[in-house]
Amino acid sequence: MALFDWSVPVASLVNKLQENGYKIYGVNDGEDMVTIHPNHSNLVARKKAVDVIASVDESTLVVNKDKKMFGLFIVLGNEPDELVADYHSNDDLEKVIDEFQSYWEGKKCPTKSE
């Protein structure tokens, strides 16, 4: 039986954020805030964030840029282009999310074997 592999679109989102200068602060998994050490490389921070996000149905990814914090509410189960269900209003962040959504529009979530 094939299962959805949400780590692929989630990693795509986190990578897109990092490419645009956003640092990963942490992920709230609905119970705990998993903080990601600021000295981790982008790759290590991305892997840790993806692991937490992909392990729950809903989470909040917290990022920062220019000393400002932003939250992105992530819902697994939506189509990949609708992964970000809500976020703090900011023109730059909106541009990044729009690019992510355009890339995933019309694409299905990848699958993996059990």
Image (spheres, grey):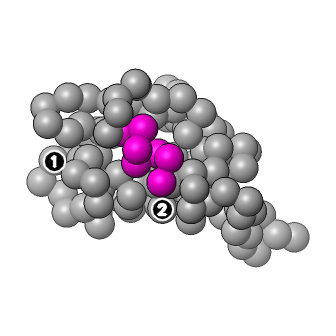
Outermost residue, bottom direction?
113
Tell which of 83 and 4 is nearer to you.
83
Task: Give amino acid for label 1.
Answer: Pro
Which residue is rendered at x = 13% and y = 32% of the image?
67
Compared to 31, does 9 lie above or below? below
Give the residue at mark 2. Answer: 12
Q: Position of residue 29 (x, y in %)?
A: 49, 34
Which residue is rendered at x = 48% and y = 54% of the image?
99
Which residue is rendered at x = 35% and y = 33% of the image?
91
Task: Give amino acid for label 2.
Answer: Ser
Compared to 25, does 54 lie above or below? below
Tell me, yes or no, if residue 87 can be seen here.
yes
Q: Position of residue 79 (x, y in %)?
A: 72, 49
Tell which of 17 and 91 is nearer to you.
91
In terms of secondary structure, what is the magenta stretch mainly? helix
The quadrant of the image that shows the C terminus is bottom right
Give the residue at mark 1. Answer: 38
Compared to 93, does 4 lie above or below? below
Residue 92, located in which quarter of the rendered image? top left
Segment tinted magenta in the rendering:
93-99
Q: Position of residue 56 (x, y in %)?
A: 60, 42
Residue 97 drawn in magenta: yes
Q: Secondary structure at mark 2?
A: helix
Q: Secondary structure at mark 1?
A: loop
Which residue is rendered at x = 66% and y = 63% of the image?
5
Tell me, yes or no, if residue 114 can be seen here.
no
Residue 6, located in which quarter of the rendered image? bottom right
